[in-house]
Amino acid sequence: MHREKRLDLIKKIVDSKKIATQEDLLAALKNEGVVATQATVSRDIKTLGLFKSVKADGTKCYVTPYEQKKEKKLNKIHEAIRSNVTGVERIAWLNIVRMPLNSNYANALGSLFDTSNMPEIVGTLAGNDTLVIISRSEDDAIKMKQFILESINK
């Protein structure tokens, strides 16, 4: 396999599976029909800028720089929800998110959601202390409500 194709495959593997060691990556590549040496994988890891990160469940595994940025963004959203949200109510494909009266935090939280690229969110509308999260479907709205409740209770 050509180097560029192998690098693309490694990115896909790391983004979709928990790869804790170079041996895990070698095994995943082998499952995809790619034979590589530990030295090659080590160079590929360096080329791609992969590094080990601690996931939310406490496990360490390789992540791509993009995945790390995404994880940091989600952690920021979790913290913002935990610190500022007092309640959430789902109405069809909408989630109404409440914050303390006159907190002026709805716009900031809406901006975090708008830039998160979460597939369950079409957009947000923010007032002073209320944020409306608009989803494509009721199923997506249910997922968003669960995400918010889990963040509150973390």
Image (tube, rainbow, N blue to C red):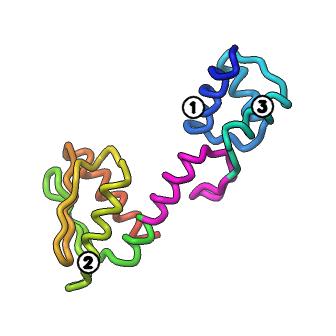
Q: Secondary structure at mark 2?
A: loop
Residue 3, picture quadrant: top right
Say if 14 sits above or below 61 in the image.
above
Cα distance between the residues tagged 1 and 2: 38 Å
Residue 65 picture location, percent across and down:
59, 47
Residue at (19%, 67%) from the top-left corner? 126
**Residues in magenta, as a range:** 53-76
Report the Cα–Cα distance between label 1 and label 3. 14 Å
* Residue linked to disc 2: 99
Give x and y (percent) for residue 30: 72, 20
Question: What amino acid is found at the position of numbered circle 1 in the picture?
Answer: Lys
SS at mark 1? helix
Mark 1 = which residue?
Answer: 12
Query: Does label 1 or label 2 sit earlier along the sequence?
Result: 1
Q: Residues within 10 Å of mark 1 (few under 14, many from 20)?
A: few
Q: Amino acid at mark 3?
A: Val
Q: How many marks?
A: 3
